[in-house]
């Protein structure tokens, strides 16, 4: 089955990241034609000059529009594209040279209308970025429960590295206006329409994620706020595993309380778990500093997500508030 791929990349005030992404595309070993559609989502610092420098090397379509969020920008890009299979990327990723070859190889033998791929930290990333990457991808954290399944059907792709057929896009009408959370929402709606999803293990990207502890906290806190909303919209997909960071947060508070009464067993379990994080990250990156920073990354991740999850659950599921009114900042208004 011949496919013409269109990369869809929304960008918001990140011209330097777009340069790195386009440079990695130039280095790919894929010999067939493909296009790149970049959608500037109301940026004040645009990527126009950067993109012009690649005009003679890559097939790029560049669009500027008002700020309506990444979901709507991806939809806009897919509407403008020429391909029959879209590959959606965040602007802060770098592609390995064999990325598109691996995608085509998988889809030509096991076609699915939607796929996702894993992410990792590039060797050029900072120690902080590597620590955050470890926190978000390790089997010792939520990375082990976010749907790393090789089987067809129930893998939930993430929009930093996601493929979607033109047919599935038109059937589902693409992403909604919630952010973050627009990617699992789309996936669940695709399942309801009868489309399968899959993980392509070899379709890896290098994902920078956040570049400061503050930005990382804000991101994971929003992830926590979004999940109870998605559970309300799609109650059949709610799982106990989504409670893990919140339960971890409650467990830490319980452990500290027990320690005040001379019961050290629970705090010892916590220290042992954080020790495993340190050992795992240190061995993976062969760097003690990253090991220590990974402990901080895990604590920020669980605290931020858990706090957001409990807050959202309280308002959405207990007080029955409307998500769009209670958490206006999570919803973009399409213009």
Image (tube, rainbow, N blue to C red):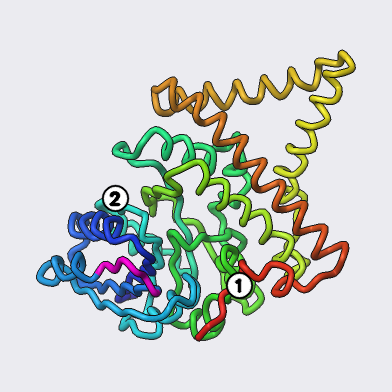
Please determine whether, in this image, residue 302 is positioned above or below residue 267.
Answer: below
In this view of the protein, can residue 108 be seen by the observer? no
From the viewer's perspective, is the residue at label 1 or at label 2 nearer?
1
Which residue, given by chain and number where applicable, does mark 2 sit on? 96
Q: Of all residues shown, which one is farthest toward the front?
A: 44
Task: For label 2, count other residues whose C-alpha is less than 10 Å away and answer few (under 14), some (14-19) or many (20+).
Answer: some
Residue 111 on the magenta span: no
Percent across and percent down for residue 69 are: 49, 72
Please determine whether, in this image, residue 186 is positioned above or below residue 268.
Answer: below
Q: Is the magenta stretch mostly helix, strand or loop?
A: loop
Front residue of 41 and 95: 41
158 to the left or right of 265 = left
Percent across and percent down for residue 107 are: 40, 66
Percent across and percent down for residue 21 are: 28, 57
Tell me which segment is drawn in magenta. 42-47
Residue at left offset 79%, top offset 25%: 256
Nearer the N terminus, badge 1 or badge 2? 2
Front residue of 118 and 319: 319
SS for tag 2? loop
Task: For label 1, count other residues whose C-alpha is less than 10 Å away and answer few (under 14), some (14-19) or many (20+).
Answer: some
Residue at left offset 69%, top offset 74%: 324
Front residue of 312 and 137: 312
54 to the left or right of 43 = left
Dividing the picture into quadrants, the one containing residue 190 is bottom right
Percent across and percent down for residue 70 are: 47, 70
- State the quadrant of the N terminus: bottom left
SS for tag 1? loop
How far apart, in angstroms, are the residues tagged by discs 1 and 2? 33 Å
Which residue, given by chain and number where applicable, does mark 1 sit on? 331
Dividing the picture into quadrants, the one containing residue 17 is bottom left
Residue at left offset 62%, top offset 61%: 154
């Amino acid at each position: 089955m011949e496919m013409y791929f269109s990369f869809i990349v929304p960008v918001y005030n990140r011209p330097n990241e777009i340069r790195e992404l386009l440079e990695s595309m130039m280095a790919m070993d894929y010999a067939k034609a493909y296009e790149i559609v970049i959608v500037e989502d109301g940026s004040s610092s645009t990527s126009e000059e950067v993109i012009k420098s690649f005009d003679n090397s890559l097939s790029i379509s560049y669009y500027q529009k008002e700020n309506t969020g990444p979901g709507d920008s991806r939809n806009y890009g897919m509407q403008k594209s020429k391909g029959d299979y879209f590959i959606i990327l965040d602007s802060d990723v770098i592609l390995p040279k064999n990325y598109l070859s691996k995608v085509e190889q998988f889809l030509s033998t096991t076609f699915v209308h939607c796929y996702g791929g894993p992410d990792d930290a590039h060797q050029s990333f900072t120690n902080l970025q590597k620590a955050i990457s470890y926190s978000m991808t390790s089997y010792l954290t939520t990375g082990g429960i976010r749907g790393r399944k090789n089987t067809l059907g129930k893998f939930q792709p993430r929009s930093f590295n996601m493929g979607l057929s033109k047919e599935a896009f038109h059937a589902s009408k693409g992403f909604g206006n919630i952010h973050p959370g627009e990617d699992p929402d789309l996936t669940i709606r695709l399942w309801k329409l009868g489309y399968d999803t899959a993980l392509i293990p070899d379709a890896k990207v290098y994902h920078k994620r956040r570049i400061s502890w503050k930005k990382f906290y804000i991101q994971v806190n929003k992830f926590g706020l979004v999940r109870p909303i998605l559970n309300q919209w799609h109650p059949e997909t709610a799982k106990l595993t989504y409670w893990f960071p919140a339960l971890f947060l409650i467990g830490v508070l319980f452990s500290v309380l027990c320690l005040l009464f001379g019961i050290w067993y629970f705090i010892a379990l916590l220290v042992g778990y954080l020790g495993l994080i340190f050992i795992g990250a240190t061995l993976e990156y062969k760097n003690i500093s990253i090991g220590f920073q990974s402990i901080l990354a895990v604590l920020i991740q669980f605290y931020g997500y858990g706090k957001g999850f409990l807050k959202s659950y309280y308002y959405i599921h207990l007080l029955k508030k409307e998500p769009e009114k209670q958490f206006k900042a999570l919803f973009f208004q399409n213009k």
